[in-house]
Structure formats: C-alpha cells, structure tokens
Image: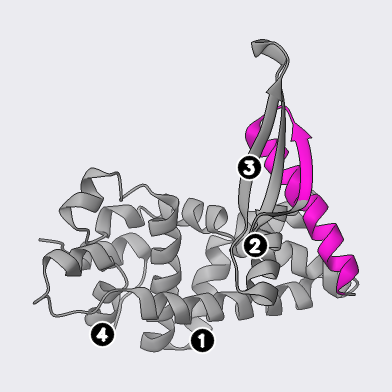
Amino acid sequence: MIDWNDCQKNLGISFHQESLLEQAFVHSSYLNENPSFARPNNERLEFLGDAILNFIVAEKLYEEFPKLPEGKLTEIRASLVCRDTLAELASSLKLGDWLLLGQGEEANGGRTKASNLANAMEALLGALYLDQGLAKARRFILRQLKSELKKIKTGKTTPNYKALVQELIQRQKKLTPVYHLVEATGPDHNKQFTAEILVKGEALGRGTGKSKKAAESQAARAAWEKLRCSHG
C-alpha cells in the first residue's frame, strides 16, 4: 500500500485533496486489472497538465528572452516540454516509485518507461494546479526546470528537433511521424547511419550521423526546416 504522505514529503508538496495526488499516478493498466478502484486513471490530469506546462514555459521564456523571435522561442519550449526532458525530471523526483501499474506493465519495466514518467509529471502538474492554483504549479515546475533554463541562458543546449517536428506534424496533419533506418555503413568502430522521417510513407527529411539517434535528429531537423519554410 502506498503511503501518500511519504510521496508528498518527497515532492515537498502538501496536497489539500490527496485524491488528486493519487489520481496523478494511476496508470490505465492498473484500472484494467482493478476496475473497482476508486480513482480514474491519470490521463485527464495529464491533458490538463500538458496545457499548463506549455503555458508556464512559454510565459517564462517570453519574460526571460525578450529579444528572441517566435521561431526560436518555439524551439526552446519544445526542448523543455518534450517527453525526454519530462521523463528526466520525473526520474529525479522518483515518480516511478509511486506509479500504480497493472502487473503486465510492471513486469515490462513500466516504472522506468519514459512515456509513463513524462505522463506522470504532466498529471502531477495538473493535479497541483487543481489543488492549489496556477502560482503554486508555476513555482513547482520552474523549480524543476531551473537547471535546464540555466543551460539555455549559457547557450549549452540545442533544439530538440524530434520534439519540434512531432508537435508541428501532429498539429498540422493530426499524424505522428515515424523514423526509418535507411542504412548503416562502415566498420563497427566508425559506422555511419542514415535515417528518414516518414509521415504516411512520405519522406519529409533525411539525415546521417554516428549513431541511429543522431541520424534521426538530423532527419528531424531537415523536416523541421522544410515544414517551417513551406508554412511561413
């Protein structure tokens, strides 16, 4: 049985409605196996938290970087609110320890899955907003993002083109892009990877790199630049 007081101590937050805190950690797989459980899953809170997160980050960037154009602000925001960043924040807060998971999801490493952790982070933010308002939610998430914001100020971060392209394609086409490894050439100690980003079979960009991840990032960058130009 989870001790939610321990969870609140860990987070440094005291909830007025503990039910909201608990709901933030209910994965859909848990309800599938425990249909009589008192709380709904965290997906609605995740939806709310995502919107609040984007607003808070956009507001902060608008204030902190008065000379940056809209396109650059969009790039930075996408890097801050992407799944990987949120999963890292959630991991640092040990959110995975509190997740309520079904047995199958638990067995498949659900506590460390980036998607589950990122979703829990957004759901927690949504729960905190409902429980204590925007000011408390803002203070909480900006405290977690402090080091990332510092990196941006010192120029030690680069845009997350995969996150940017996914956001743009989902908004424009209501589709999610996929990546395809075209080829891997060269000896094992010096391989060169080539990848494409596809939407419904159409290649939007191609990139190369020393790793599959680097190649995908370059493909995403090519697609981002192409899409931004074609849509002004």
Q: Amino acid at mark 4?
A: Gln
Residue name at image x 18 percent, y 67 percent: 32
Instruction: Give SS at disc 1.
Output: helix
Counting residues from the N terminus, which is met first, the one under dot 4 or under dot 2? 4
Q: Is residue 68 visible?
A: no
Instruction: Give SS at disc 2.
Output: helix
10 Å neighbourhood of mark 2: few (<14), some, or many (≥20)?
many
Q: Read off the residue under disc 2.
A: 166
Instruction: Give SS at disc 4.
Output: loop
10 Å neighbourhood of mark 1: few (<14), some, or many (≥20)?
some
Q: Label 2, label 1: how many angstroms apart (C-alpha)?
A: 27 Å
Residue depth check, mark 3 versus mark 1: number of the one nearer the observer: 3
Counting residues from the N terminus, which is met first, the one under dot 1 or under dot 4? 4
Q: Label 1, label 4: how many angstroms apart (C-alpha)?
A: 16 Å
Q: Amino acid at mark 1?
A: Leu
* Position of residue 143 measured from the top left corner of the image (x, y, whole percent): 55, 65
Q: Amino acid at mark 2?
A: Gln
Counting residues from the N terminus, which is met first, the one under dot 2 or under dot 3? 2
Q: Read off the residue under disc 4.
A: 17
What segment is highlighted magenta in the picture? 205-231
**Mark 2 vs 3: CB contact within 8 A:** no
Q: Read off the residue under disc 1.
A: 134
